[in-house]
Structure formats: C-alpha cells, structure tokens
Image (tube, rainbow, N blue to C red):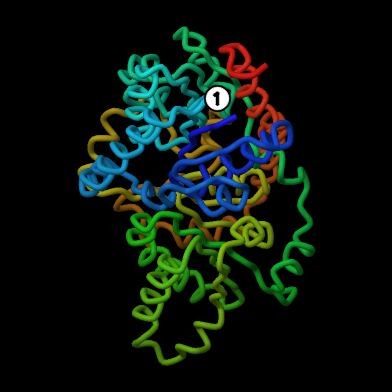
Amino acid sequence: MRIGIIAGEASGDILAAGLIKALLIQYPDAQFEGIAGPLMIEAGCKAIYPAEKLSVMGLVEVLAHYRELSSIRKELINHFINNPPDVFIGIDAPDFNLVLEATLKQAGIGTIHYVSPSVWAWRQYRLGKISRAVDLMLTLFPFEARFYENHNISVKYIGHTLADEIDLHIDINQAREKIQLEVKPEQSVIAVLPGSRMSEVTRLAKPFIETLLHCLHSRPDLIFIIPFVNQKTRHFFEQELENELAPTAKKEDIRSHFILYDGRSRDVMAASDAVLLASGTAALEAMLLKKPMLVAYKLAPITYWIAKRLLKVPYYSLPNLLAGDALVEEITQNEVCSEVLAPKLLSLLSNELWQSKLDVFNDIHTLLRQDADNTAAQAVIDYLKEHDKLS
C-alpha cells in the first residue's frame, strides 16, 4: 500500500500520525510520503516538505506566501502523478489540498479528504469544488457529516482522536505533578495558548501578556503556564514579555509568575484552573479537558472584514459550534485587549455557572469518542478495497 498524505499544521499532524499508525497495524509494509509534521515522521511518513510550510492562516496571509505555496503544490502534483499512490489523503489545509486533490483525481488517483473545510459556516460555493476534488470526505463532527449527506457527497463521520485520547475525567493534581508544577493551595493557575501559527502569536502575544499582567495586579497569587509548539513562537513571546517587563521595577518577581513549556499543551491545560487561548483545535482540547476558557481570535483587518460578511454561523469556536450554544465567550479583533480580556478571565476562576457548562462538555466528549484513528483507517481500507487497490 502506497499513500500520499499531506498535513499542514500541528492539529493535522496529530490526526495524520494516528491514521498512519492505525493503518500500519493492519498493513505493516504500507508506505507514506508527502508533507509531514514531526509526529507523522515519527510514525513512519517520508517528508517531501515539512508541515510548517503550510502553517499560514488567513486570506491576506496566504496571498503573501502564494508563490512559494504554488511552487510546492506544483512539485507535489508532478511527483504523485509520476509516482501514483494507491490513494491520496489530504489532512485539513483545504485551500492547498483541494486544488491538489482535484488535479490528482482528474489524473485517475483516488482522493480522500480528512477534516471538513468549514463550508457549513462560510464559502458554501466550495461544495462544487469539493465534489470534483474528493472521492470521500472524513469528518470529525456529526453535524458536518449530515451537511455532506444533504449535498450528496460521499462522507464518513469518524469522531475526533483527541476525544479518544483524553480521559473523561482529569485529576488536576496528577496533571500538575506530570509537568512538575508546584502550586500553593491559595494559588490559581491559568494556561495561556497564544496559537500554534506564528501569524497568531504575533497578533496575540502582546494583548495576552498585557491581560496577564492586568490579572496579576488584581490577583498576585496567579501562575501563568504557557506552552509553545516550536522555538520560533516561544522566542517571539519571550521577547514580547521582556519588552512589557523592561520598565517594571519588580521585573524578576513578576517574571517568576510566568512558566514556559516546550510543547505539552494538553498537559499544561490539564494542570490549569482556566484557559486563555487562540481559537482553533486548542479550544476543542480545552473542552475535552473540561476547562473554563476564554477564546480570542484576531486576523488581519481585511481578512476579518471579508470573513465576517461570509460567515453563515453565529459562532466560530468549536465548543460553541458543537453545542449549538454560546457556552464559551468569543472575543474578536479590537476587543482582544487587556481591558476586555482581564475581567472576563478572572471571572472564570470563580464562576459557579461553569459546572452546568462542563456537563455539556462531557456529553459532547462522549459523542466524539468513535475510536477515530481506527475508524478513519478502516474507511481508507474500505475505500481501497472498493476500488480494487487491496485484496
């Protein structure tokens, strides 16, 4: 079995690695190559390009990298057409993958897309493009599968691998021991995730740091734990923190309230009392960990202006979309500032209403537990057998 596979960011790397491992259990000689993150490479995928090449978010931001992305896609199309895999699997990154999938499908190569584009939310004109590009869509959430069924596109709901991996109940003390976090009984811990992409961190680092300092002024007992996906985002955040603390007399004392980690975002969130984060897969993970959270989203002004006019749903964060209700607060654009964020974040630490929300989180967690890695792998195998690629 030869599979072409492309993932473009940390969340796609997790999903793709789980799929690769599940397929290798049944087909140990299977070969995988494409655009791969570190987890995919560790699972056995040959990386033609690293996944970080596709980690660009926003319409305007993508335009700035268009020439490089177009060149990479053209090279991959030539590679896969000259060396046809049994199937090509695009993991998320729809603006990159769908064009590639359409070309490969036209050349007679079967295509599967894993993680639905947000066509149910905006840019529904892409449905025709998806139909022409994709033989089978694998969705993480049940409402997405219903949407595709209503539009006669072949689909399989597989659930989310994070829901399988994360326990329904988390012991916060064990979580703190795991990351060697020592906390006094009177102290509260806030996890801060400013994003996995550099474009997110550059927009959110400063307002997040200002928010944390504002909170610390009101609550000197607070501890902030902050994970980073790579050294580049960590260095940028550290520099912003240094800039904010430079004129402060008690710089070292304040800095001691900030604890930075390389990776381990799930462990960091599990060890927290509340979470401040950039919208994305991290919000889903925080929901599965049953954490009170505040979600922020900030784009280039033109990107936001366009997106706001095309959006067909009232929410953008996954917890709210899955619940069909405003369970968590969503703060956008110019509202992403310490004056708005700080009081909302502090209120999470003492909001008794969160218990009823956490019960809803638990219900959603149970719904998403579908043994996603193996379900996805079986969907790929069934597709290959149906098209006479496997005996």
Q: In this view of the protein, which residue sits in the foreground, 183 or 261?
A: 261
Query: Up-down: is 134 above or below 258?
Result: above
Residue furthest bottom in the image: 249
Q: What residue is rendered at 32% in x and 33% in y?
A: 78
**Front residue of 207 and 137:** 137
Residue 339 makes an appearance in the image: no
- Secondary element under disc 1, as helix, strand or loop, is strand
Rendered image quadrant of residue 379: top right
Q: Quadrant of the N terminus?
A: top right
Instruction: Give coordinates of residue 100: x percent, y percent.
Output: 35, 30
Residue in the picture at 55% in, 83% down: 256
Which residue sits furthest front? 82
Tell whether 325 sits left or right of 76: right
Up-down: is 250 above or below 186? Answer: below
Residue 36 vs residue 139, the one in the foreground: 36
Quadrant of image for the C terminus = top right
Which residue bears the numbered disc 1?
A: 138
Left or right position of 38 against 119: right
Spot occupied by residue 330 in the image (x, y as percentages of width and height)? 44, 44
